[in-house]
Image (cartoon, rainbow, N blue to C red):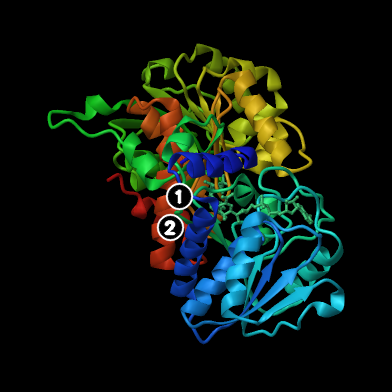
Amino acid sequence: MKILNVDQIRALDQYTIQHEPIAPINLMERAALAFVDWFADHFSTSTAIKIFCGLGNNGGDGLAIARLLLEREYRIEVFVVRYAPRESDDFMHNHRRLKLVTENIRYVELTHDIPAIRHNEVVIDAILGSGLSRPADGIVKSTVEAINRAPATVVSVDIASGLYTDQPNSPTDVIIEPDYTVSFQLPKLAFLLPKNGRYVGNWQLVDIQLHKRYIDTSPTPYYFTQPKDARLLLQKRDRFSNKGSFGHALLLAGSYGKIGAAVLSAKACLRSGVGLLTVQVPQCGYEILQTSVPEAMCRPDEHQRVLTGASEVEGPEPVDYSTVGIGPGIGKAPETLTMLRSLLPTLKKPIVVDADALNLLSENRDLLAKLPINSILTPHPKEFERLTKKWENDYQKLDILREFAKKYKVIVVLKGAYSAVTTPDGDIHFNSTGNPGLSTGGTGDVLTGILTALLAQGYDPIEAAVLGVFAHGLAGDRAAEQRGPIGMVATDILDSLRWD
Ligand SMILES: NC(=O)C1=CN([C@@H]2O[C@H](COP(=O)(O)OP(=O)(O)OC[C@H]3O[C@@H](n4cnc5c(N)ncnc54)[C@H](O)[C@@H]3O)[C@@H](O)[C@H]2O)[C@@H](O)CC1
Ligand SMILES: Nc1ncnc2c1ncn2[C@@H]1O[C@H](COP(=O)(O)OP(=O)(O)O)[C@@H](O)[C@H]1O
Ligand SMILES: [K+]
């Protein structure tokens, strides 16, 4: 699913109006109806509701929502925040229609017009939408502050008033802090960025049938991976396939005290369909790995505690494997850096690089140029900062991500809520699955195993990254259903992984 910018969203509305065709007021009615359908699923008619409307089309939505809620016998009070002398045409139209059915419309011009809001009430925030062009000030600011102070449940229409759709807010901006955001049709970039969490709440999309042709032909670097997008990427298995059909992966993982990382990665790799798996661990990990992952072959490193790459056991060279996954639990010993230095230039196909392998790269940035083209790097934000530089806001972080992926021709998976899969062309696919239960040690090692398995099976590296990150998050969601987000651990994700 595409994420469009604010100008494109406006143009999409206009395109729909012209080409469906539909009158603007009817499109607003459709949006209001979609909102009200959602609202009716979440709140009973006994709820006391205060609707705050601005003077633009977001406010127009609010007025239409008020009328439709009245029709469904909700108890509502409407407050129009009069911050300017002019209203939009569709606002005025809905204002006239609402006045025909209720006299209960009040105007907020001065702070003493702002009503008291009680804890068992629901506030619908339709003050400002995607038309925001400057920070909230004056009576808008005071109203937003009063709503934020109130103990009520807050539902924002389309986007929280005061939040920009796709540019940074300043830390001093006053913005609604909703419990829910009910947005129209397409996700907004602002919803996916960590600093905006409290200005978005639990966000949901409602379909208002905006024109598909415009969406399909609009260029954008931003995508949001939906279940149907991921399903399209999944390769079917041939009836006559054999284990040789699904590649032979090499995992370089583990060090003394961190063999668990190697175990988790290895298990995830096997549970993600790899044909054969060899794991190289330091000698101290040999018995642990052979016992806990009998399906994997183990090549013990000649070093007791850390990886050096050398082994007394004969085996293929790393370049001869379908792919290599390197990093989980490897530490930053000088011997391991030496291994990385000599290994990288020999590899020709995309590999997966995670954890301490990334930290070694950030301390030895000359090695970045040695990464095979289209390799997948999986930093969490701290690791990514070490590889690049500190960012001032989430939007700058996205720019740095895209520059980095372009410069080194790699795919960067910036992990976290809505993990961002960034391609060498500068596209970013935000992941839709996953939950805070994944914030527990070892879940990143599982992801490395998954991605390594997909590369070994011959998946295109971008598709491997998008699909692997989606499947990992989905397994996390299943694990959270079974165990709850607090009790789940990385092993539960392994048990929940499914590829159908
Ligand atoms: N265009 C359409 O056909 C549709 C629009 N929809 C709604 O329309 C909204 C966008 O409407 P608008 O473009 O009218 O914009 P808004 O309703 O967000 O803003 C209204 C006006 O306020 C002014 N403004 C911006 N920042 C301000 C601030 N800080 N303080 C005071 N005034 C400020 C702007 O100049 C703008 O004209 C969407 O968020 C959505 O809710 C929906 O009804 C779906 C269909
Ligand atoms: N709040 C969250 N929502 C969704 N996914 C999350 C969240 N927190 C963490 N994750 C996911 O969990 C994984 C954590 O990886 P990482 O930080 O490398 O942990 P570790 O190194 O301990 O395994 C990543 O895939 C990340 O996207
Ligand atoms: K709003």
Q: Which of 181 and 94 is in front in this view?
A: 94
Identify the residue at image location x=71%, y=82%.
117
Identify the residue at image location x=40%, y=38%.
467
In the image as oriented, which residue stretches furthest toward the left?
240
- In the visual, does 68 lie left or right of 192? left
Is residue 187 visible in this depiction of the protein?
Answer: yes
Residue that mark 1 sits on: 473
- In the visual, does 137 lie left or right of 430? right
Residue type, mark 2 in image: Asp
Image location (x, y in percent) of residue 385: 71, 37
Say which element carries label 1.
Answer: helix
Identify the residue at image location x=85%, y=56%.
172
Q: Is disc 1 surrounded by few (<14), some (14 to 19) or many (20+) residues within 10 Å? A: many
Residue type, mark 1 in image: Gly
Q: Is the CB of mark 1 within 8 Å of ligand 2?
A: yes
Is residue 285 visible in this depiction of the protein?
Answer: no
Residue that mark 2 sits on: 477
Of the four image quadrants, the one with ligand 3 is: bottom right
Q: Is disc 2 surrounded by few (<14), some (14 to 19) or many (20+) residues within 10 Å? A: many
Do the residues bearing badges 2 and 1 touch, measured as CB atoms within 8 Å? yes
